[in-house]
């Protein structure tokens, strides 16, 4: 406004103010660095922090490579905060240095995860329906975007005594634990080793495994990626053992079926095998046994993916059972019970 009202000649007076030079000093790149909600928990404990120093909590954070930043030179790795809001990408001078730093941080995260499992089990022990956590950790799930391109999205997987829970962030409170975005029943799920996959963008190899689950809509398949061979071995072990423990924990599963135009109840016991009884409408107890067969007599099973299940036994041949809905959950339960029985017999290490 002053310049508009000024005449043709304007006099400017310039004065050097030394005290103002500090305001023009370039700030540290760490000043605006955000590490998610974990920073709030650290504000009270870290009093003497400076703009040139940041503290990243490793507990329950996600250590990975080539997830959001693709590096064909293998010099970078990523740290994602437990709430998913903070991402720190670090680049080393060469692949060897990057690997050394990755390995050192990874070892610390493994130790911290064990502590976090103990802490979570103590917190959840007072819940209405307490379940023990046997393993948990970050991995990435293979998805397809709108352009039909394969993408990887991080997910936090938790293995309970009878379920596999998946979260978008690491659960911190009882409310968080009660709201997974996906729940897969262990009894109707099967671990599948997929091996290595290669990225067309970075050229990196990924270690992957799959989980196939029998549902009322058919078979769901989920592919997950882990960062190390140790992670792959660990998830393989805990998922296989978890399904076998779920069989022992559940013991018996029953389905309403139609057999030879009769309403019946098919009971599958984790050790004794199959029992088909007449379905009773009244309170007279269990109906008459139509047939019973141990697992040892089962030669094969098959289904139509819609409602029919066929069980072929040595003694009574093929039996057709109409479950009224997709038989895949029952098929997966049978396979889990069989696997657990074979393992208990000592035929599997």
Image (spheres, rainbow, N blue to C red):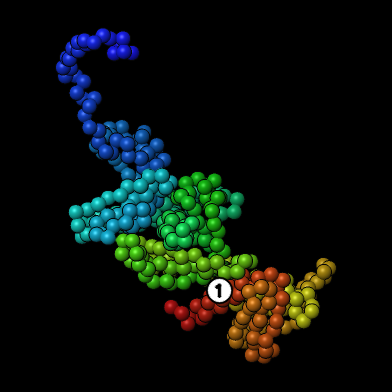
Residue visible at 68% across and 77% down in the picture: 308
Taking the view exactly as shown, the residue that stands out farthest to the front is 8
Asked whether the viewer can see residue 112, the reply is no
**Quadrant for the C terminus in the image:** bottom left
Residue visible at 65% across and 70% down in the picture: 326
**Quadrant for the N terminus in the image:** top left
Q: In the rendered image, which residue does mark 1 sit on?
A: 336
Q: Is residue 174 above or below residue 275?
A: above
Q: Is residue 311 above or below residue 176?
A: below
Percent from the top left, x then y, of residue 250?
Answer: 60, 67
In terms of image quadrants, where is residue 262? Answer: bottom right
Percent from the top left, x then y, of residue 277?
Answer: 75, 77
In terms of image quadrants, where is residue 97? Answer: bottom left
- Asked if residue 82 lies left or right of residue 253, the reply is left
Residue visible at 22% across and 32% down in the picture: 26
Question: Which of 101 and 315 lies nearest the eye of the viewer?
Answer: 101
Taking the view exactly as shown, the residue that stands out farthest to the bottom is 315
Density class for disc 1 (Cα within 10 Å; few <14, some 14-19, many ≥20) is: many
Percent from the top left, x then y, of residue 205?
Answer: 33, 66
- Asked if residue 81 lies left or right of residue 6, the reply is right
Asked whether the viewer can see residue 332, the reply is yes
Q: Is residue 229 above or below residue 36?
A: below
In terms of image quadrants, where is residue 7? Answer: top left
Total labels drawn: 1
Percent from the top left, x then y, of residue 23?
Answer: 24, 25
- Helix, strand or loop at disc 1? helix
Residue visible at 43% across and 46% down in the picture: 83
């Amino acid at each position: 406004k002053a310049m508009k009202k000024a005449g043709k000649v304007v006099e400017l007076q310039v004065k050097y103010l030394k005290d103002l030079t500090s305001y023009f000093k370039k700030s540290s790149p760490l000043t605006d660095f955000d590490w998610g909600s974990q920073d709030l928990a650290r504000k009270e404990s870290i009093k003497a922090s400076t703009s040139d120093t940041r503290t990243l909590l490793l507990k329950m954070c996600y250590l990975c490579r080539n997830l959001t930043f693709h590096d064909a030179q293998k010099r970078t790795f990523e740290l994602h905060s437990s709430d998913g809001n903070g991402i720190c990408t670090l680049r080393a001078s060469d692949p060897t240095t990057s690997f050394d730093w990755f390995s050192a941080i990874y070892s610390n995260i493994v130790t911290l995860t064990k502590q976090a499992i103990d802490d979570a089990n103590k917190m959840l022990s007072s819940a209405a329906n307490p379940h023990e956590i046997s393993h948990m950790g970050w991995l990435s799930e293979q998805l397809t975007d709108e352009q039909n391109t394969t993408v990887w999205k991080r997910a936090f997987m938790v293995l309970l005594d009878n379920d596999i829970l998946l979260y978008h962030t690491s659960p911190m409170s009882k409310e968080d634990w009660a709201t997974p975005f996906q729940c897969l029943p262990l009894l109707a799920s099967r671990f599948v080793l997929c091996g290595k996959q290669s990225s067309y963008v970075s050229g990196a190899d990924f270690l992957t495994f799959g989980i196939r689950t029998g549902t009322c809509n058919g078979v769901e398949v989920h592919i997950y990626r882990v960062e190390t061979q140790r992670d792959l071995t660990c998830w393989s072990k805990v998922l296989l053992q978890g399904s076998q423990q779920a069989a022992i924990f559940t013991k018996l599963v029953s389905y309403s079926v139609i057999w030879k135009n009769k309403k019946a109840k098919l009971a599958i016991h984790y050790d004794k095998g199959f029992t088909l009884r007449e379905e009773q409408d009244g309170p007279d107890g269990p109906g008459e046994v139509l047939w019973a067969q141990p697992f040892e007599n089962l030669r094969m099973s098959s289904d139509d993916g819609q409602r029919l299940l066929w069980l072929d036994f040595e003694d009574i041949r093929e039996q057709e059972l109409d479950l009224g809905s997709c038989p895949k959950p029952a098929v997966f339960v049978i396979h889990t019970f069989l696997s657990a029985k074979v393992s208990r017999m000592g035929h599997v290490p």
